[in-house]
Amino acid sequence: MQKDTAIRLLIVDDRVEDAEAIVSTLRNGGIAVRPLRPQNAAELAHMVTSQAVDLVVAVDSAAMPLDQVRAQVAASGKDLPLLLMVDRIDEAAVLGALGGGARALVLKHRPEHLLETVRREWADLDARRGLRRLEAQLRETERRCDSLIASSRDPVAYIHEGMHIRANDAYLEMFGFEAFDEVEGMSLLDLVGPQHIDGFKQLLKSLSKGEPPPPEYLMEARHVDGSTFPAKLEFATATYEGEPCVQVVFRRREELDPELAREVEELRRRDQVTGLLNRPTFMHLLEDAVAAVGRDGGQYGFLLVEPDHYARLLPDIGLDSADALVAALAERVRSTIDANVKAARFGEHSFALLLEGNHARTRAAADALRDAFATHVFSVGARSVTVTASIGGVQVGEKIASVPQILSRANQCLGAAVELGGNTVQVFDPGAADRAEEERVALWVTRIREALVGEGFVLHYQPVMSLQGEPGELYEAHLRVDANGELVTPSGFLGIAEEHGLLGEIDLWVVRHAIAMLGERERAGRQTRMLVRISPASFASTTMVDLIRKELAAHGVPGERLWLEAPEAKVFTHLRNAQQFLAAVSPLGCRVGLEQFGSGLDSFQLLAHFKPSFLKIDPGLTAEIGRPGEAQDKVREITARARDEGIATLAEDVDDAQAMSQLFSAGVDYVAGGFVAPVGAAMNFDFS
C-alpha cells in the first residue's frame, strides 16, 4: 500500500469509542484513513451513494442492522467491499455473511486481523480498479488499432482457432476477395499452398495451446483462383473484441538466396557501429522474456551498462573518434559475456544485457563486466584510455514483470551506481527486499536499545510562542537518534520501537532528560516549561509516575513546568489507563494534554471523559487554516469550546504569517513552527 494513499473508510458502529479504535488501529499500523461514520440509516444511505468511499466496516447494531447495511451497499451499484466485525468466526457466520454480500469477516478485539484484512481488501480493490482502467484503455487501444489496420497497406487478418474473424482491405485484395463476408469464418488453411498444409496444421495446434507464435513463417500462399505465390507470415498475439486471437500479417516475398536473406535479416537486427543488437530488437527480446515469466515463472536478469565520465572522455579522444570508442566498449562487453547472453546498444553510449538465471548469476555477470572494464586499456586510434563502468540492473521475476517497471528500476539502480562514484554495480532483487527490511528492523532495534543505555538519543527543542502575551518560556522537546552521525527523527524509528515494545523505555528516557534540562534552566534562573510527548505505554504502570515524582524532587523543578502530551486517538483507545495516569500526575502539578486534537470522528466526546490542561490542534487543520472553509470553522469551534472549559490551545507546524494571523483571530493561545523558529539543539529563543 502506498504510504501517501488514504483509504476513505465508512464505519457503521453505534459506539463511537469502537469506531475510534478501528481508526486508531489502522493508523498505528501505517494505514492512512479518512473516516466517515453515519449516525443513522438516512446518513448511511447518503454517504454510500454520494460520498467517495473505498471500504465499509460494519458492526451489527439495533440502529443499523447488517441486513440494512448490506442492502444499502448493494443498492449503490459500486465496487464497495463490506467488512463485518464479529465476535467469533464459525461456519454459520461465514455462510451468512459471505452469502449476504460481505467480502470478509473481521474479529473484534484482534487488531492484527483488522489490519491484514483491510490491507488485503484494499489491495484487491486497487487491483480491480486498475484492471477496469486497463480494460477501458485496451478497448480504446483496440478501437484505434482496428482503425489503423483498416487503413493499412499491409495485409492483416485476425485468426481465432484457425478461422478468420477480421481482415482488412489489403488482405482481401491480396487473395482476390471482394468483401470480408467471403472470408469470414474461413480457415486459414484454405489460403495455404498444398505442400505446406501439414506443417501449418501443427503451427495452428501450437497456437491454440497458447504457445508463442514464431516471429515469421515462410510458405506458399494460395490465391482465390488457385494460383500460389511466395509469402512471409508474421504473427503476434492479440485480442479482438475482448477475445484472444492471433494477428497475422501476410507479405509477398521475393525469392532470394536463403543465405543472403538470412544475412539481410541479421543486418536489420544489428547496430551498425557496435555489431550488437539494436534497441528495437532487444526490446522485443525483453518483452518475450517478460511474457515467459508470466507464463511459466522463469527468471531473467536485465542490466544497463554505462561508461563513467563519458563527457570527459570525449575531449581526450576527439569527437571524430566517438564511434570508435563506443565500438571498443561494445567489443569488451561482447568478449566478457557468455554466448547465450543477449547484448544490445541501448543508447548513444550505453549497453543493455538480458540473461536467463537467478539473482546470483545476474550479479556475477555484472561484477565480471565491471572488472573487465576496470582492468582493460582501450585503444582508440592512436590513443589509449582507461574506462570504468557503472552497472544498474534488476532481477526480472513474478514480483517485477513488466517492461516499464524493469526499465524504471534498472535506471534507478544505474543512477545510484553513478552517484556512488562509478565503477559500481547496483542490482535490485525483489526477493531480497523482504530480507533487507528484516535486517533494517533488526538494526534499528539494536540501535534503539544501545541508545537507551548510551548516548545515542539526544533532545532538540522548539520554542512555543504565546499569542496572548503570556510571559515565560515554553519549549517542546523533540527526540532524535544518532545513526552513524546522522540525526534521525522519530518518524524513522518509533513504529519499529512500538512493534518491539520499546516505547515505554523511550518515554522514560525522554522524560528523565527533559526534567534534567528543566533543572539546569531553573538553576540558571530561567523558569522554563517543556512539552514532552509520551505514549500509552506510560499510562499502564506506575513506573512513569514514580520517575516523574523522583526526578522533579531531585532537580528541584516545580511540577507545572512539565507539560505531558499524548495523541487524542491513543487516549481514546486507552481511556481508562489515561484517566488513571492523569489522576496520578495532576497532584504533582504536571499538566497533561492532547495532541492531534480534531483528527478523530468525535473529538469533543473525549472531553467528557478526560479533562486535559491543553489541546494541540491537529496539524492537518493548521495546514489548511489559510483557506476559508471547514478547517477555519473547526479551529474556531475547538478554541471556543476549550476557552469555555478553561483549556489552553496550541497549534504546531505554523509556517507563514497568514496562518499565524488566522490562528490569532481564532483565539489560539500558543503557536509553534518554522515561522516562529525551527527545531534546534539550543534553547536560546528570545521570548521577549
Image (cartoon, rainbow, N blue to C red):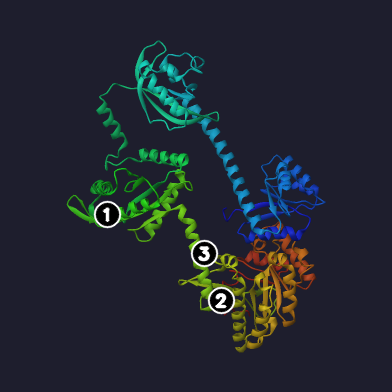
Q: Secondary structure at mark 2?
A: strand
Amino acid under disc 1: Ala
- Looking at the image, is 607 positioned above or below residue 434? below
Residue at image mark 2: 459
- At a point 47% along the width and 18% down the height, the residue shown is 187
Residue at image mark 1: 372
x and y percentages locating residue 141 in the rendered image: 52, 33
Numbered label attached to residue 441: 3
Front one among 261 and 155: 261
Residue density around tag 1, few if under 14, some if 14–19, many if 20 or more, within 10 Å: some
Q: Quadrant of residue 74?
A: top right
Mark 3–mark 2 CB contact (< 8 Å): no
- At a point 73% along the width and 57% down the height, the residue shown is 19
Q: Secondary structure at mark 1?
A: helix
Mark 3–mark 2 distance (CA, rounded to whole Å): 23 Å
Q: Secondary structure at mark 3?
A: helix
x and y percentages locating residue 223 in the rendered image: 40, 14
Amino acid under disc 2: Leu
Looking at the image, tell me whether mark 1 or mark 3 is earlier in sequence order. 1
Numbered label attached to residue 31: none
Looking at the image, tell me whether mark 3 or mark 2 is earlier in sequence order. 3
Asked whether residue 60 is in view, the answer is yes
Query: In this image, 37 relative to 119: left or right?
Result: right
Mark 2–mark 1 CB contact (< 8 Å): no
Query: In this image, 559 relative to 455: left or right?
Result: right
